[in-house]
Amino acid sequence: MGVEGIGARVARKEDKRFLMGQGRYTDDMSVPGMRYAAFVRSPHAHAKIKSIDTSAAEDMPGVVAVLNGKQMLDDGIGNLICGWMIHSKDGSPMKMGAWRPIAHETVRYVGDAVAVVVADTLGEARDAAEAVVVDYDVLPAVTSAVKALEAGQPQLHPEAPGNLIYDWQIGDADATDAAIAAAAHVTEMTIVNNRLAPNPMEPRAALGIYDSAEDHYTCYTTSQNPHVARLVMSAFYNVAPENKLRVIAPDVGGGFGSKIFIYPEEIVCLWASKRSGVPVKWTSDRTEAFLTDAHGRDHVSTVKMAFDANNRITALKVDTIANFGAYMSLFSSSVPTYLYATLLSGQYNIPAIHANVRAVYTNTATVDAYRGAGRPEATYLVERTVETAARELGVSPAELRRSNFIRSFPHQTPVIMNYDAGDYEASLEAAMKAADWNGFPARKAEAANRGMKRGIGMSCYIEACGIAPSAAVGSLGAGVGLWESAEVRVNAVGTIEVLTGSHSHGQGHETTFAQLVAERFGVPIDSVSIVHGDTDKVQMGMGTYGSRSGAVGMSAIVKALDKVEAKAKKIAAHLMEADESDIVIENGALKVAGTDKTVPWFQMALAAYTAHNLPAGMEPGLKEGAFYDPANFTFPAGCYIAEVEVDPETGKTKIIQFVAADDFGNIINPMIVEGQVHGGIAQGIGQAMLEGVHYDPETGQLLTASYMDYTMPRADDLPSFNVSHQNTPCPNNPLGIKGCGEAGAIGSPPALINAITDAIGNNDLSMPATPQKVWAAARAAAN
Amino acid sequence: MYATNYHRASSIADAVTLQSSSDEAKYVSGGMTLIPTMKQRLAAPSDLVDLRHVGELKGISVNGSRVRIGAGTTHAEVATSAELKAACPAICHLASHIGDPHVRHMGTIGGSIANNDPAADYPSAMLALGATIVTNAREILADDFFTGLFETALEDGEIVVAVTFDAPAKAGYAKFPNPASRYAMTGVFVAKASDGSARVAVTGAGSDGVFRHAGLEQALSANWSADATAGVDVDASNLLSDIHGSADYRANLVKVMAKRAVAAA
């Protein structure tokens, strides 16, 4: 490792512009003639649109156009789709209702777009949007997925009778039932995974620019995967063919999954630009974000975990109802199936698993992937259940986990996944040591003397990153492949541009990807630039989500670097009249091993482009591309321990310590990895103790539509984190990387709830564990 | 935000004239509630009359036991006033926990009590201290001033000029913040007058806004100690219930915060 190579704590190159306010986000983009869009949104959770009167709005100052969904339909703009096909257990395909970018017949959640105003200023657009008169026939609404499945409830889509999208299963039901019937002990629970709003710092935005001279569209947008946006908008939404559509995702201020999906607004901005003849920009305000960004989680599950007389887990049976909201978002169907039920084995050797999952329409915002996407739900269910079982069985929670750990790899679970590597014991031991687990009873007693209730809880999580190989996910229903592309361009002066299909929106790719090149060629990272986020620059890519940029995106870069290195060595060998196999690259130079012959990197690059003296038959230039399709998922894992103190008088919970012991495989930049873990844990603390989306169950109004009511984690809600790594390299990619982006959000909620329930002596506690809930549960336990 | 006309008043008289010139004019002091409400298009005053530059509204004075705080005094000025810390440290403590530093340097005591947000901190202090609200027209006892949610005894165009109160023998304030907004989910201000009588006012919890609690006042008048709150019954039936806290939970918080306020006094 050099000072800038793999494993170095290099300060983030991108931070200078971010910290100086010089980032360039979609809302910073301005083009001549640009106008502003404001959406007219449904105030009702469910209603028929009887009429839309835009006449008053059209006469308002500055108004360029007032457009509706019928016009969009007439112009041939397609429905929004879900791109992962799931079949129900009876073999029928999932039942997808129509999602129009602008509703013209029925609105199905508060915030559904019904018209858009384009005006000279944002204020004028908003004024005119208020002047659009929509006559609604209000219908009954349902917001709970459990309730939406009951008879007599409002029906959202004619395509999905009973609001049921699919009824899917995985695993062996008979073997699972038999094992439960024969068990020495069965732990049963009902587990609710609370609905979350993603809240990236930068809200969604889009700028649509139609160029009539070229019949060409440009879309600046807040996307985690601009190429997928272009593909979907071309292939399904009929906005424009791919060669006539450029999508640019410039600096993007956080996504957490919510910016994977293609939303109505970017489609509308492009269409409205052509229709009205002006570039059209829309930027979500925060309440619009709460209303219309795809939410996360929202599962209700029942679980049975069976044990034999030796406390070995013999079976796990899960029944889950997943709330999808009013429409099927782009990857919604995959989240509670292949990203959730396939992880239900956790870190444990479980011979029989069966899961049934029903996906349900409700009159709420869409629900899709949010940091962790299915894996937090699986981890919370498994780790709450194991902890509860330990309490019921009267054994140490660490011991119960330890005695059920998977210890030999590869390990085939009963739910598709083949774990390739791991050492769960190592993380457990490291976490317990760091937390001084054995000293807890003394700390609990000391807290009790102060009238405080102290608790400790752990969580041993596993997750799956780098979703792939493409053929496998294709066979499971994915509409896209999940490879990644890279192109490495060595310029004539030796500086290097790396074009990647990954997209950085907080992950620090400009630094870590450059470290990879610095390690390989010994060049300074400042001579390496990372190019991403523009479909005119990078040919194709699958974007960043699912902790895939390291394991998949960097692996593609490695493949391209391999090719560059091979050609560079050929050139150097020719220049130095040496054998290619004797060439080594060190400190920015190509050398003949064992001699003092050397060619500086830049001189080799120049030779490639002057082409005055290249090996016979070699093409000039030095630019190589690669596509990388992984052989398997990667499986990060770890052990998290939370220690809390509850004030029984108020229910206020203070996190005393939070220990994370993770196995992410090999690490490129430990500082960035630790930052990812810190952020993930902060979001996990948010889910466990603070955040929850609430709709009024009768009216479907969003009650948590601002930070006055939606509790985002703040600095004083968080402790300092104790983070360490016990890494086993991933055997399935060239860098041995597993991925680290989501682990914190996946592993932390059960550790926290296990700790709080331990403190108050009442296991009946749901997330978010707010002061009032903790107070009530503590009081119930005391009485 | 809708378009509005901004006016900077130079005196109380000037402010009244400016305000009376339009049916839809509003005074703005710190603007910590009004401006965000306007930005959300939930308020649309035609004219804003800015009171921040009116010298008559500024300043803190303590004459003997009588305390006077100008309506235009910011929370930060109250929090850090040496005179107030000597006379009534509880109100400094209260002010130091309103909002965040930005809010405390913009928001004013007059704006807060004139707005009478049911979760604001100051109304509980005014009630418990038995304060007098001085306006440009008259003096109003705090007991008569706070009339309901965002409702006060102020007439249209009337301006709060100052608040005055006798420095208490002892006083304390304890707040349990709403986890999301950090406003008071329940805040209790306790004050013991020089004659030994206790006044207890609760903010954040009442379904009709800030209120005095007779049971706690009796208990603390009889025995000014944190333990004295233990036997008091707090009726949940007139308390707020929302996603953050049920009425029962708030009833519990009233007792716990009262106990902690006395302990801090």
Image: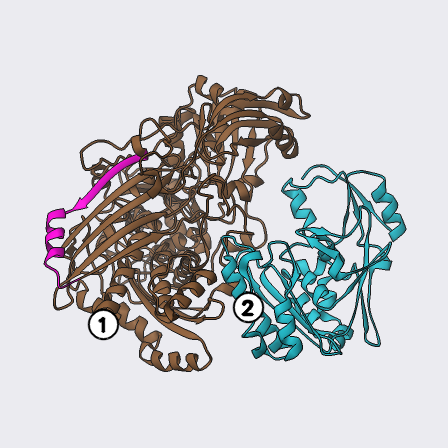
Residue A94 % position (x, y): 27, 33
- Determine which residue is flagged by label 1: A394
Query: What colour is chain A?
Result: brown
Question: Residue at (30%, 33%) from the top-left corner?
Answer: A162
- Determine which residue is flagged by label 2: B233
Instruction: Please give left or right for residue A538 compared with residue A37 in the image.
Output: left
Q: Is mark 2 on a helix, strand or loop?
A: loop
Q: Which of A452 and A482 is in front in this view?
A: A452
Q: Is mark 1 on a helix, strand or loop?
A: loop
Q: Which of marks 1 and 2 is in front?
A: 2
Residue B173 visible in the shown view: no
Badge 2 sits on which subunit? B
Q: Which of B208 and A268 is in front in this view?
A: B208
- The chain coloured cyan is B
- Give the colour scheme of this rendering: by chain
Dot 1 amino acid type: Gly
Residue B262 % position (x, y): 62, 76
Residue A127 vs A213, above or below: the answer is: below
Q: Does the magenta stretch include residue A184?
A: yes
Question: Residue at (31%, 38%) from the top-left corner?
Answer: A149
Q: Does the magenta stretch include residue B19?
A: no
Both marks 1 and 2 on one chain: no
Residue B62 % position (x, y): 82, 73
Badge 1 sits on which subunit? A
Q: Quadrant of the C terminus of chain A?
A: bottom left
Specify the segment rendered in magenta: A163-185
Q: Residues within 10 Å of mark 1 (few under 14, many from 20)?
A: few
Instruction: Please give left or right for residue A101 compared with residue B107 in the image.
Output: left
Residue A362 vs A442, above or below: the answer is: above
